[in-house]
Image (spheres, rainbow, N blue to C red):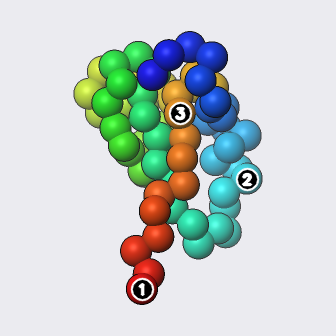
Amino acid sequence: MSKGSAGYSSSSHKSSLKGSSKVYMWYCDNCSNGPYLVANNDYCPNCHHQRCSYCVVERAPSTRR
């Protein structure tokens, strides 16, 4: 993803999600891989980049029907 994309810092975004039943995914700014679960991955499994404010974080689509 490109620099300047809407993103969130790792620590502030993660703390705001505690207790949330919503699932958030992120895409690595360094290698563009993803999505990865915010709750499970602070670092990109592909390139080991730590999630930063340039990494794009999105709410996962609901699977409820």
| Label 1 or label 2, whichever comes before in sequence order | 2
| Circle number at residue 6 | none
> Residue, x 37% and y 31% (percent of image)?
44
Check disc 1 and report its element: helix, strand or loop: loop
Spatial separation of the CA atoms under disc 2 and disc 3: 16 Å
Q: Do the residues bearing badges 3 and 1 touch, measured as CB atoms within 8 Å?
A: no
Residue 32 point in image, percent of width and height: 36, 24
Residue drawn at the location 70% of the way across and 50% of the way down: 15
Residue type at mark 1 is Arg
Q: Quadrant of residue 43?
A: top left
Q: Which residue is mark 3?
A: 56
Which residue type carries mark 3?
Answer: Val
The crowd level at tag 2 (other Cα within 10 Å; few <14, some 14-19, many 20+) is few
User: What residue is disc 2 on?
Assistant: 16
Quadrant of image for the N terminus:
top left
Instruction: Tell me if I can see residue 59 in this picture.
Output: yes
Instruction: Bin the neighbour count of mark 1 within 10 Å (Cα to Cα): few under 14, some 14-19, many 20 and up.
Output: few
